Amino acid sequence: MGIASDIHPGDDPFEISEKLVGRTRTKLLRELFNFFEIPIEFIEHVFGNLYARDILTQRERELCAVAALCVLNRTNELKSHIIAAIRAGATKMEIAEVILQMSTYGGMPVCIEGLDIAKRVFEKSKQAIST
């Protein structure tokens, strides 16, 4: 699997998901979609259309996702998108800065929790990013 920067319109949406959030998270998506009989068009829209657009870089797109998920306090998804941001080329300091900026919009509790999640991801980065 390549890095997130080699995602292009028309790529298979599950391959895009694997490049961004990894095999484990993509497997969970497949299982949930199959269990609840959610049409494939949903994931095709998210990963085949939105994530394959080339207006924002994957790095910029993932930093946006990190910001939104931090403020919304969606910790499982935040972890996945911090991993995706790293895969897309975001640095430790860029991710921390985005999360710090979210203290303005979501308050210090979500900022601190976001930084804690990011710290754990970076501490386990080799293991977390390869799955």
Image: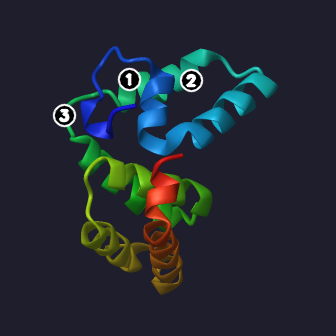
Q: Is residue 24 above or below residue 123?
A: above
- Count residues near mark 3 (Cα–Cα under 10 Å), then give few for <14, some for 14-19, many for 20+: few
Q: Foreground residue, 1 or 46?
A: 1
Residue shown at 51% from the left, 72% from the top: 120
Q: Is residue 11 above or below residue 112?
A: above
Question: Percent position (x, y) of residue 93?
Answer: 26, 73
Which residue type does callout 1 highlight? Answer: Asn
Q: Is residue 52 above or below residue 80?
A: above
Is residue 37 at least partly visible in the picture? yes
Q: Say which label, 1 or 2, has the lower sequence index.
A: 2
Q: Which residue is mark 3?
A: 55
Residue shown at 48% from the left, 48% from the top: 130
Answer whether labels 2 and 3 touch (C-beta < 8 Å).
Answer: no
Q: Say which label, 2 or 3, has the lower sequence index.
A: 2
Q: Which residue is mark 1?
A: 49
Residue shown at 33% from the left, 74% from the top: 96
Q: Which residue is mark 2?
A: 42
Q: Secondary structure at mark 1?
A: helix
Number of the label disc, if any, that sits on residue 81: none
Which residue type does callout 2 highlight? Answer: Phe
Q: Secondary structure at mark 3?
A: loop
Q: Is residue 110 above or below residue 10?
A: below
Q: Say which label, 1 or 3, has the lower sequence index.
A: 1
